[in-house]
Amino acid sequence: MNAQFDVLIVGGGPAGCACALAMHNKGYRVALIDKATFPRDKVCGDAIPGQSFKAIHQLNPQWSAALQQFAEQTPIHASKAFFGNKIFRYQWKLFASNSKRIDFDHFLYNLVRSETTTTLIQNQQVAAVSHTHNGLLCTLKDGSQLEAAIVIGCDGSNSIVKRSLLKKTDNKEDVYAAVRIYYSGITGVTPGENEFHYLKEVEGYFWIFPLPNQWCNVGFGILKNKQKQGAPTDARKTLETIINSAPFKQRFQHAVPMSKLTGYSLPVWGKTQVLSGERCLLAGDAACLVDPLQGHGIDKAIRSGIMAANQAVKCLTAHSFDAAFMRQYDTAIHQSLGKELRRNYLIRLYWSRFPGVVQWLTNLNPPQKWIDLLLKKIKL
Ligand SMILES: Cc1cc2nc3c(=O)[nH]c(=O)nc-3n(C[C@H](O)[C@H](O)[C@H](O)COP(=O)(O)OP(=O)(O)OC[C@H]3O[C@@H](n4cnc5c(N)ncnc54)[C@H](O)[C@@H]3O)c2cc1C
């Protein structure tokens, strides 16, 4: 294989698919390459934030209508945060849903297939990307090569595009470790409501998210570098301990595991962000855009994928690919996503340093309208 493209998108998850959808009808040769064959699974909590649907709607209302109507999802209208026996409830304003990523990502991928002229390349891993005198050369694991004017790294955490072209890796200080398992038959689950449990004993949170057919996505996430009493917290063991402890033991008494317990990392927004370089843009997890407070990244992946496509069009129109021109994309990301992510980064930082303050605040039993105001501010 030796092909030439204007834009090569590496990674066909939400960031890559949104990027390909946003390149639709722009008149450029676009390819989307993924090392997996779709449908492919992705370890996740499977909660698709409302902003994801809104961003797709802005691209094309018919696409978001199709996305809202596809069968393998369960609409979610509220989230409940549990601090011991205190419960704070937040009603979603936008349409949101839970959908197993194997289904959701496949739907998005098929949308790219049916609605755009993108060249789809599956089951091909990018091994390295390098500069040539007038473009980029992408070498695949099987030795074949692709040429492109611009490469957009939508290849998730530990991005090869980021490592090859920008010589950077994810900042270990800002990576969460999270695990998830599917269960059926958990009791006490309210349809349409996601549960977040913040426990006194461990930092991080435990979740139960309802899925279609009485399944639930159950998981636990924690900052990788976070240590309690000198010993690193093992997310897998912690999840098992939580499930086997009161008050969850009773709810899981007749529950049946429907998958293995699997883990993956979440590169969250931190002190510094690497977003672009000469002929190169990063979107989604590759750009570390996961919300540091909630661990949500699908919406940011979709939104940044669209912004990366917009920047690629600007570069191709102006025939300008240098690092300084690319930084317009950094500015766009900071303006549209940065404020919310920075604020949530600071909240997470203070929460982690002063957990007693959060405990004290919850003990004050604040009225629901204060909670609504606060949650609106942090855009839950
Ligand atoms: C346990 C857990 C729970 C989570 N829960 C939630 C949640 O409930 N809600 C939420 O919004 N977010 C959640 N997240 C975060 C969310 O999963 C990510 O933010 C989201 O998947 C980012 O999308 P992306 O397109 O950037 O990357 P990905 O979805 O990771 O897609 C990257 C794609 O790139 C491909 N790829 C990688 N390397 C190469 C290569 N070298 N060559 C070719 N292809 C390559 C991969 O095969 C993959 O298809 C969770 C994450 C974890 C780990």
Image: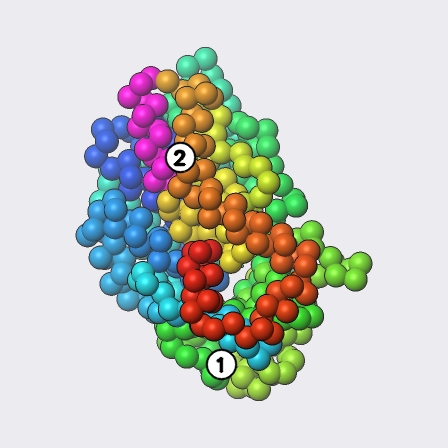
Identify residue type, mark 2: Ala
Principal secondary structure, stretch drawn in magenta: helix
Q: Is residue 291 visible?
A: yes
Q: Residue at x 42, y 69 (%)?
A: 369
Determine which residue is flagged by label 1. Answer: 186
Can you say whether 99 is above or below 223 in the image? below
Q: Residue at x 25, y 46 (%)?
A: 58
Q: Is mark 1 within 8 Å of ligand 1?
A: no
Q: Earlier in the sequence, mark 2 or mark 1?
A: 1
Query: x, y (%) of residue 13?
Result: 41, 48
Q: Residue at x 52, y 79 (%)?
A: 256
Q: How is the image coloured?
A: rainbow
Can you say whether 108 is above or below 28 in the image? below
What residue range appears in magenta?
A: 304-319
| In front: label 2 or label 1 | 2
The image quadrant where one finds the N terminus is top left
Identify residue type, mark 1: Ile
Query: x, y (%) of residue 170?
Result: 60, 40
Residue 242 in which image quadrant: bottom right
Please name whichever residue, 243 or 259, is drawn nearer the observer in this view of the structure.
Answer: 243
Whether the magenta-drawn stretch holds residue 81 is answered as no
The image quadrant where one finds the C terminus is bottom left
Determine which residue is flagged by label 2. Answer: 332
Query: x, y (%) of residue 179?
Result: 58, 62
Residue 2 in which image quadrant: top left
